Image: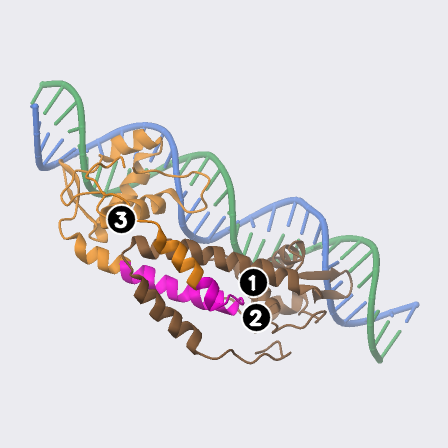
Chain colours: A orange, B brown, C blue, D green
Amino acid sequence: MITVDMRDRKPIYEQLIDNIRTLAVQGYLQPDEHLPSVRQLAADLAINPNTIQKAYAELERQNVIYALPGRGNFVSPNIGAIAREERARQLQTLRVQLAFARRAGVGREEIEALLDETYQIPTEERTGDINE
Amino acid sequence: MITVDMRDRKPIYEQLIDNIRTLAVQGYLQPDEHLPSVRQLAADLAINPNTIQKAYAELERQNVIYALPGRGNFVSPNIGAIAREERARQLQTLRVQLAFARRAGVGREEIEALLDETYQIPTEERTGDINE
DNA sequence: TTAACTGTACTAACACATATAGTACAGTTA
DNA sequence: TAACTGTACTATATGTGTTAGTACAGTTAA
């Protein structure tokens, strides 16, 4: 489900970019799946079509989706490369955050406990339904 | 050393807040140490005094520093509570980032490797010199 | 006492990013 | 043909961050 949070400090178009890329990378959107049109998604989320267009344009630049003028926007078929990039980015962000945590006085044992917690919960189900 | 990065998306006053709080919490600034005056720091960093004032005001609100009108701004003597808050915040941020990393497909072993890397490097030296 | 510091409180102006509103045009589809 | 689609504009509004300038009261040292 594509959503936005108006109270979030992050701009709407960035929320959309991260949201849709995550959905695509994690398999909640199938390759070549037809995304909602600019005007339709704008109506659904009650925001301006220009904002949707801005997000779609950036997602196309990132090769997460592709556009066929007159037809619509579609999920990129080779999402694997995007997934690898996303994975690398999350790993790098985690590396930085680990350093911050250590400098703040967090002990390794505490992080191990967090790891247990994080990997305890089983992986979520994936379907082709965009609304999940 | 108090610094700002003009290219950073984060506002200058927020950089200053995080920067100074980190220096205080990690012992690079001593309790009751005299901070640079609003006008002096503005001159050093080549930014507007109002921006410094905004950061100092917020740091005082967070009990990281205290102000004596006519005298200057000083590091809070009971920085311990601030340090505990900072530690909790970093832990919470780490918790969220771990969840993101897992969802992006990062395996537990990779994170264990990052942990080794993070806790391998010995702790840095701390001095009372503000310029370190 | 005076001069030079200090924090603090304003107003005004500017720059920038975000978001909205409206219009237009060309390609696609039923 | 009608109703979709993406795309490209211009204009406007808004909020945030930053700068500029002024002012006033408290502190400190010569």
> Is residue A132 found left or right of B90 in the rendered image?
left
Disc 2, SS: loop
Measure the C-alpha gap from mark 3 to mark 2.
Answer: 37 Å
Residue A116 among magenta residues: no
> Is residue C26 found left or right of B74 in the rendered image?
left
- If you read the primary sequence from the N terminus, does the residue marked by circle 2 or circle 1 appear first? 2
Given the image, what chain letter belongs to the residue carrying mark 2? B
Dot 2 and dot 1 residues touching (CB under 8 Å): yes
- Label 2 packing within 10 angstroms: few (<14), some (14-19), many (20+): some
Q: Is residue B117 above or below residue A48?
A: below
Quadrant of image for the C terminus of chain A? top left
Residue A100 among magenta residues: yes
Residue that carries the numbered disc 1 in the rendered image: B16
Measure the C-alpha gap from mark 2 to mark 1.
Answer: 7 Å
Quadrant of image for the N terminus of chain A? top left
Residue that carries the numbered disc 2 in the rendered image: B2
Tag count: 3
Q: In which quarter of the image is residue C29?
A: top left
Given the image, what chain letter belongs to the residue carrying mark 1? B
Measure the C-alpha gap from mark 1 to mark 3.
Answer: 32 Å
Percent of width and height locating residue A90: 33, 59
Given the image, what chain letter belongs to the residue carrying mark 3? A
Which region of the structure is painted magenta?
Answer: A87-111
Q: The disc labelled 2 sits on which kind of residue?
A: Ile
Q: Quadrant of residue A38?
A: top left
Disc 1, SS: helix
Residue that carries the numbered disc 3 in the rendered image: A21
Q: The disc labelled 1 sits on which kind of residue?
A: Leu
